[in-house]
Image (spheres, rainbow, N blue to C red):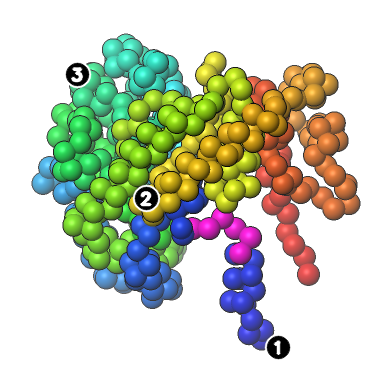
Amino acid sequence: MVRSDALARLHAMQAGDLPVHGGRTLAYVYDSGLAEVDRIGREAVAAYAGSNGLDPTAFPSLLRMENELVGFAADLLNAPDEAVGTVTSGGTESILLAVQAARDSRPEVVSPSMVLPETAHAAFHKAAHYFGVRTVVVPVGDDFRPDPWAMGRAIDGTTVLVVASAPSYAHGVVDPVSEIAAQAKAKKVRCHVDACIGGWVLPYAERLGRDVGEWDFRVPGVTSISVDTHKYAYTPKGTSVLLHRSPALRRAQYFASARWPGYTMLNATTQSTKSGGPLAGAWAVVTTLGDEGYLALTEQVLGAVDRLVAGVAQVDGVRVVVPPDATLVALACDETLDPFTLTDEMTARGWYVQPQMSFRGRPATVHLSVSAATADVVDDFLEALDQAAKASVAAGPVVVDPGVVTFIESLDPARLTDDDFEGLLATSGLMGDPDAGLALPERMAEVNALLDVAAPSMREALLVAFLDRLARPVRY
Ligand SMILES: Cc1ncc(COP(=O)(O)O)c(C=O)c1O
């Protein structure tokens, strides 16, 4: 018997998720606030859900949409006429491919490496892990930007790629791209600018007369740029654009295999069969909004950021870590309140803000990705933040049981067993009813505080063990 209530069941399940509209979810989602544009994007996704991007000759409309989307991005980022690009599934895939292409363009390098600031997105570490590229990590200064000379000094004969962010996710500042790219160019090494989150905002910010520095293809030495449409181009999830300055720089990104009896596999991305839906959705939204639409949305979102930054200065115990260059704001707390309690208190008031763990001696912070839709609710946000800060002060510090700290310190992250993890859950009281399985507590402050005291490698191991527990099949 075929059931007819799948959509009703879907919507019921979805009600428990974070809202993707309304501007109150300040991570993971990007909301233009334009319902009609959203509708067009979603209808386009649905119309192309069954089309296969594997073979552009079989689905020529997908090839056309891809070339038009890449063309739009190339114009936006001032790419030279010979620039080329690929639509990928997201920022991480664009970064993976940039690293893979850089590695494979230098087959003579036995142990390839890349130079990146400590603030570069974790996707570069994933690429390093997948492709056997060593990371040479350069610290950032008090302004959360790396010293370009230190980046230059870190380049050696094994360096296949140098990385800069425009801007960085965690602190929202643009790296000194011109100086970094100059160092890379002088040493004939590729330089990738990760503009995944800022690449659709900064060009319009510049047109609006804001000083955003130099970071796009006008900078000599920048060889590739990633920019995600599924972030600030406000398209449905599932697309990013990876641009290369020339076809020669892209060549190593392609994979072809005729070493089997079936069709010759020929891919520009890690996926082979891929839905045409995300590309169609991105194309539909980008061509609907166009330059004019994005200029207006950027003016709106940057206005919201300005008001938010000014308003945070009036909230006791909370401050902006560093003046943001685009739409991402990091908040820090003074010793009177705990940032993880603050995020819980914001959740309790209907706002999602994202905790960021302490790192390399710098304290934990709270991340905000501000959307155009947030512009209408900035005053409500500030009101909620003020109340949340007061409630956090009243709640007092989150103390991790010293016994739990000792237990964590006794564990080896490289060899964390199921028993260790079980022991930790029991010691920390996270496993309520063992028969009911793992359930997320309502308040996350204790969990976050516990992760925060763990070393990064331990954090990784604990979260992997945690996800492994969550990802278990539901059998009927
Ligand atoms: C600067 C930057 N790079 C890369 C990524 C990874 O993008 P995605 O989550 O689409 O894979 C992000 C995501 O927020 C980002 O902010």
Q: Secondary structure at mark 1?
A: loop
Residue 249: give x, y in percent of width and height. 24, 39
Q: Nearer the viewer, mark 3 or mark 1?
A: 1
Q: Earlier in the sequence, mark 3 or mark 1?
A: 1
Name the kind of residue labelled 3 in the image. Ala
Q: Is residue 118 left or right of residue 34?
A: right
Q: Is mark 3 within 8 Å of ligand 1?
A: no
Answer whether residue 240 is visible to the viewer in this image. no
Answer whether residue 435 is visible to the viewer in this image. yes
User: Looking at the image, is 470 positioned above or below residue 141?
Assistant: below
Dots 2, 3 in contact, CB < 8 A: no
Q: Identify the residue under disc 3.
A: 186
Name the kind of residue labelled 1 in the image. Met
Question: Could you give the CA–CA distance between mark 2 and mark 3, rounded to whole angstroms?
Answer: 43 Å
Secondary structure character of the magenta stretch overall = loop
User: Looking at the image, is 144 positioned above or below residue 461?
Assistant: above
Residue at image point 75% right, 30% down:
416
Residue at image point 57% right, 51% down:
350
Residue 430: give x, y in percent of width and height. 80, 39
Quarter holding residue 370 = top left
Quarter holding residue 177 = top left
Q: Is residue 146 left or right of residue 428?
A: left
Residue 433: give x, y in percent of width and height. 88, 48
Tag on residue 375?
2
Question: Could you give the CA–CA distance between mark 2 and mark 1, rounded to whole angstroms?
Answer: 48 Å
Q: Identify the residue under disc 1.
A: 1
Quarter holding residue 148 = top left
Q: Secondary structure at mark 2?
A: helix
Q: Earlier in the sequence, mark 2 or mark 3?
A: 3
* Magenta range: 15-20
Residue 124: give x, y in percent of width and height. 44, 33
Residue at image point 78% right, 70% down:
476
